[in-house]
Amino acid sequence: MRAWAVFKKEMRLYFSSPIAYVVFAIFTLVAGWFFYNVFAFYTLISMQAAMNPTMARDMSVTEGVLRPLFQNISVIMLLMMPILTMRLFAEEKKSGTIELLLTYPVRDGEILFGKYLAALGIFLGMLTLTLVYPALVAWATQLEWGPLLTGYLGLLLQGAAFIAVGILISSLTENQIVAAVSTFGTLLIFWVISWASESAGSTWGRVLSHLSITEHFESFAKGVIDTKDLIYYVNLTILSLFLTLRSLESKRWRS
Amino acid sequence: MRRFATPALLLGLAGVAAGGVLRVYRPSWATVWPTLLIVGGLLLLFALYASFPSSRDFWGRRTTRYGLNALVMVVLILGIIALVEAVSYRHNWRVDLTENRRHSLAPQTVRVLQELQTPVKATAFFRPDQPGKRTAEDLLKQYAARSEGKFAWEVVDADRDPLRAKRYGVETYGTVVLEATIKDGQVKEEKITDAEEEKLTNALIRVTREGKRVIYFLKGHGEKDPASNEKTGLSEIKAAIEKLNYEVKDLLSARESKIPDDAAIVVVAGPQKDLLPNELDALQGYIGRAGKVLFMIDPFQAPGLGPLLDRYGLGVGNDVIIDVNPQGRMLGAGPEIPVVGDYQAHPITQGFRYATFFPVARTVVVKEKPPEGVTTQALARTSGESWAETNEQEIKSGQVKPDPDEARGPLTIAAVATAEAKDVPQERKGAKARIVLIGDSDFSTNAFVNLSGNRDFFLNTLSWLAEEENLIAIRPKERRNTPVFLTAAQGQVLFWVPVVLVPLAMAVAGVYSVVRKRNR
């Protein structure tokens, strides 16, 4: 219940400042622009396919619109998530309110949980806004529900993991810019780590590509749920949150 | 002791650095650089020890204990997570939620992949923007994922890498070439023009199969002999076939009641006498098992084959084709050598642009109404200046002229038939027998095979016949086609709603909340 109080306070902070609105507006603008272009390209291809019957059998709105859309949204998330999480602990550390917070009769876990849920809530809001796109697709043609579901599940799991990494890094520094840049850098490294898998030889190559965030998102984007990918995101989330707890705890005994 | 810490640190660093540099540039100084590394390392350890305030003090402190505690916990959870990841990597479970399960392989394919003995490499030739490319990549990726490292793949842009396309003889976009190294480093190759699961899996079976497949040449009725180097022999053709990884064997079917199971194709190359009834039965039984037969029948020879051909909607005319086409004259061919430059659309003649010469040939008949389950098609036709001479007297005297009752060109000189095979096991259901009938055998002999397109025509025919379909039958994935055609108004909505309306609404909400807060 005390986590709930933390959650409410954080939410109020997001919405009383322009942060949430700016994030929503910019996010929907960029994502909407991507969606519009992917969709416009797809209608163009549809026209071409209609004139060429051998091409026509490969026209699937899932492959042609939803799959690239999910991949685009996941790239935008890579850019936006660090902004969403940077202030969660860094700000409190800077202003000194963290001392106050830690002396409250609230457990570290509850503080963390409340803050995490708040960031997740904002992220859920962002995802909800993107539901406009599949709705528009469904209005124009028939939609395949399975891949839509897995795509959103993938985005949700990926977002949850990104937020966890962001909150961990925010708990390590008291400078918000440092937190944002480091989070972005960390996520980016995990994003592209599989690029080295070709040159790294077979075993290490497989390890590197298994560590990569993109590698695990792909199956969700195309309509497949693989336990391997599910567990990867859950593990990344759990590990980051666990490390955040240790980092918060260290505040007590380090000083 | 503390005052030694800094010099020890510096000396240690210098030692390690010098050791490292020498190791790279003077690896032969095998005593010098290891010593430097070891001494440097020891100095660094000493510096570390010496710089600690006082070690007993350090270990006894509260922060150290908490710190160590946290460190142990972190290492522990890292270990657990690494373990879980390793297990989940090896034992994963997946659900495919697409409507046609297009991202899952059929169990037959998975079995073939798991039983792969040799590494197989797939090279797919696509244009970057080609629609089927994504699907093909998805498919190949799944094959690789299920093969435990035995299946490698690569997509090549045929336009940017024309040399490779040429090396594999790739002519159409979307071709996939499979290569497998079989015994003694020999590389076997299979090509498919459609990246579909059924075709790919069947090609995979073919390319990794041990042993050569056999092309049998029927013997014992005066047929052309593959072993003979004479002008009328087929030794050139035999060498060309062996280059394609087939074995050539004689078939003395008079002694055997059944055609061997390893037969990829049976070639009947110009029999002069009739086949015996039991030989005809054996041939028919073979065709019933989805067999592939090439008949080459010269004028006025082997009339007993008629009833057999009739079952597959084909037949031969009792005539000799005379061709007075000026193009043939120009190339030095007599009127008894019809020249074919006009091919019907068929995989055998696809992209084939050479003329073929058929010395002393007869016409081939394609029945208008083939029996049920049989489809027939003419393959090659002579020119309009040819006719079918039926008068044997005239032919013998060498004074031929077109009579009113004789058929005028273009005359069919080669035809194909495919027939549903009734006598096949369940897993090969849908496999078809293939028959090619050519009204001449001389075109493939050593004397004529190198003339113009003769060799290619023959080999194209063989490779079409040898194609095995349906080694394994995989039901094709049903696709739901969802193209999108928008009216102008719909297009407007698709721009305004996501790009303008939604972001604007968010921005307005933001401004509203800020203003309201300020006014409060």
Image: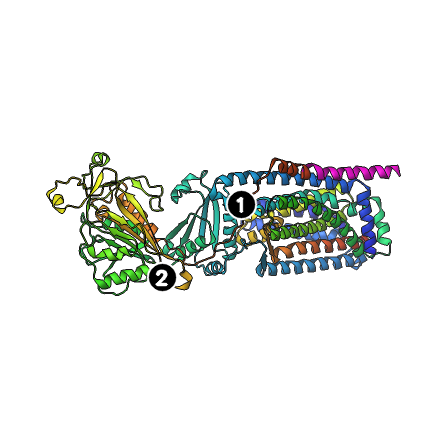
Check if mark 2 and mark 1 are on a common chain. Answer: no
Q: Chain of mark 2?
A: B
Residue in the picture at 70% in, 56% down: A238
Q: How dense is the environment of label 2, judged by Cα within 10 Å: few (below 14), some, or many (20 and up)? A: some
Q: Secondary structure at mark 1?
A: loop
**Residue tagged by mark 1?**
A59
Give the residue type at disc 2: Lys
Left or right, B453 with reference to A68: left
Q: CA distance from mark 2 to mark 1?
A: 37 Å
Q: In terms of image quadrants, where is residue B425?
A: bottom left
User: Quick one: B191 or B50, which is closer to the camera?
Assistant: B191
Rendered location of residue B267, percent (x, y): 26, 54
Residue lying at the far front of the rendered structure: B404
Instruction: Kindly indicate whether the residue at mark 1 contacts the one at mark 2 (C-beta within 8 angstroms).
Output: no
Question: For the view shown, which residue lies furthest in the left direction?
Answer: B397
Residue B18 visible (yes or no):
no
User: Which color mode does the image show?
Assistant: rainbow
Query: What type of secondary structure mainly makes up the magenta span?
Result: helix
Q: Which residues are magenta?
A: B499-520
Residue A27 showing in the rendered view: yes
Residue B397 drawn at (x, y percent): 10, 43
Asked if residue B59 lies left or right of residue B193, the reply is: right
Tag 1: residue type?
Met
**Left or right for B205, reference B270:** right
How far from the left and from the top, in percent, is residue B279?
24, 62
Pointer 2 residue: B422
- Residue A100 location (% of width, % of height): 86, 50
**Residue that extends furthest to the right in the rendered view of this protein:** B520
Name the subunit of mark 1.
Answer: A
Does the magenta portion include B159? no
Residue density around tag 1, few if under 14, some if 14–19, many if 20 or more, within 10 Å = many
Please name which of the two marks, 2 or 1, marks the residue nearer to the observer. 2
